[in-house]
């Protein structure tokens, strides 16, 4: 009777073909657990006659060992098949590396600089912490000009001479002070203004300004250079228009609009139904500025222009809120994965 049970169990052990780790564990509990088959056998074994004990005892022990070795073998072979499939399955798709993205401000800055490099400009940079001379005085700002006011400018430790630059025109001053014409530079960088943060203004933003000084530089040169820039940046159909404006450092001065590339000039809510978008300020360098920087204003003339990178990028990529540029939200930044 007991011997039959042992034989039946052994057959069950031999027939067992686990497909997963979980099945082996269930099998172990069923066979070797507290209320498992083996303990039932041992209980019954206590009742067998002493003549049979020797033979049956051996069989039971054999069966127990067999179960234990089987469990180990099954475990080992399952682990093996798993790692083997992993190393030889050439058809499994690889895990894609997620590469980083360039920030849209960097993308647009590089694009602007490349356009002007093609026109023979070189790139010049300068300090973010500046003095009054390079940001205001050399640029013909009168002493009471509101841009010097506490409301616009961040001063360092209440010293009115040391401040965070409010535009990168300071780099143009530094360039003219150290070089003689012909000068053709573009000046990218961060600028700082004490403004309330909103969808269209921020206290930190980025500019590219440009300066061209040589003999016989005219307003027509300025206009053609900017038209070239607009077509390169926004497409061959882009048109520009200049509106009279005022800056202390240029005379005459103008504000540049580009035809709205979203509605093709027909009028939409981005261009406020005018068909035009403002993109930069420009003008002929005021002779006072040339003289302040040690350049002979009777011999040389020049033009300058300046634009906010955030604004150009908003128009180019249809970004509606300037704050997105500063939040480092990956859902925003990953949209520029395809650009380079
Ligand atoms: N510096 C001006 C600004 O920051 C831009 C500008 C540059 C205007 C050069 C005219 C000429 O707003």
Image (cartoon, helix red, strand yellow):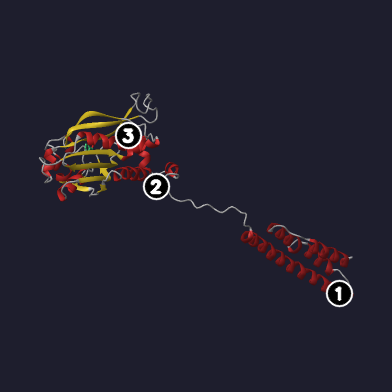
Please tell me how crowded label 3 is: few (under 14), some (14-19), or many (20+) other residues with Cα within 10 Å.
few
Q: Which residue is mark 3?
A: 200
Q: Earlier in the sequence, mark 1 or mark 2?
A: 1
Q: Which residue is mark 2?
A: 102
Q: Which residue is mark 1?
A: 55
Residue 159 shows in the view: no
Say which residue appears at 71% left-offset and 67% top-offset: 73
Q: Is 217 situated above or below 23?
A: above
Camera-nearest residue between 279 and 47:
279
Per the model, the C-alpha gap separating discs 1 and 3 is 94 Å
Camera-nearest residue between 170 and 261:
261
Please tell me how crowded label 1 is: few (under 14), some (14-19), or many (20+) other residues with Cα within 10 Å.
few
Q: Earlier in the sequence, mark 3 or mark 2?
A: 2
Q: Secondary structure at mark 3?
A: loop
Please tell me how crowded label 2 is: few (under 14), some (14-19), or many (20+) other residues with Cα within 10 Å.
some
Ligand 1, image quadrant it occupies: top left
Quadrant that contains the N terminus: bottom right
Q: Please say if the residues under marks 1 and 2 sit with CB atoms less than 8 Å apart.
A: no
Per the model, the C-alpha gap separating discs 3 and 2 is 22 Å
Q: Secondary structure at mark 1?
A: helix
């Amino acid at each position: 009777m007991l011997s039959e049970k042992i034989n039946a169990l052994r057959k069950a052990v031999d027939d067992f073909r686990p497909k997963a780790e979980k099945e082996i564990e269930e099998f172990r509990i069923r066979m070797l657990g507290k209320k498992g088959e083996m303990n039932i056998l041992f209980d019954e074994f206590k009742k067998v006659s002493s003549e049979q004990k020797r033979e049956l005892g051996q069989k039971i022990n054999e069966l127990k060992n067999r179960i234990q070795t089987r469990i180990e073998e099954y475990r080992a072979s399952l682990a093996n098949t798993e790692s083997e499939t992993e190393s030889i399955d050439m058809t499994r798709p690889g895990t894609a590396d997620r590469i980083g993205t360039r920030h849209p401000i960097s993308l647009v800055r590089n694009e602007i600089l490349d356009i002007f490099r093609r026109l023979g400009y070189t790139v010049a940079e300068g300090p973010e912490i500046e003095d009054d001379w390079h940001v205001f005085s050399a640029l013909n700002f009168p002493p009471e000009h509101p841009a010097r006011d506490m409301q616009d400018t961040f001063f360092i430790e209440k010293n009115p001479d040391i401040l965070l630059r409010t535009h990168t025109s300071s780099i143009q001053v530094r360039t003219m002070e150290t070089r003689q014409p012909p000068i053709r530079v573009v000046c990218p960088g961060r600028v700082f203004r004490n403004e309330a943060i909103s969808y269209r203004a921020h206290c930190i933003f980025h500019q590219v300004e440009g300066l061209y000084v040589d003999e016989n530089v005219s307003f027509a040169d300025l206009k053609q250079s900017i038209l070239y820039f607009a077509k390169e940046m926004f497409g061959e159909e882009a048109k520009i228009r200049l509106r009279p404006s005022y800056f202390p450092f240029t005379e005459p001065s103008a504000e540049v609009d580009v035809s709205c590339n979203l509605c093709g000039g027909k009028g939409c809510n981005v261009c406020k139904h005018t068909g035009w978008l403002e993109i930069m300020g420009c003008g002929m360098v005021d002779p006072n500025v040339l003289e302040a920087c040690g350049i002979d204003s009777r011999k040389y003339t020049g033009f300058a222009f300046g634009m906010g990178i955030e604004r150009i990028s908003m128009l180019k990529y249809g970004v509606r809120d300037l704050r997105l540029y500063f939040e480092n939200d990956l859902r925003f930044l990953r949209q520029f994965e395809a650009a380079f």
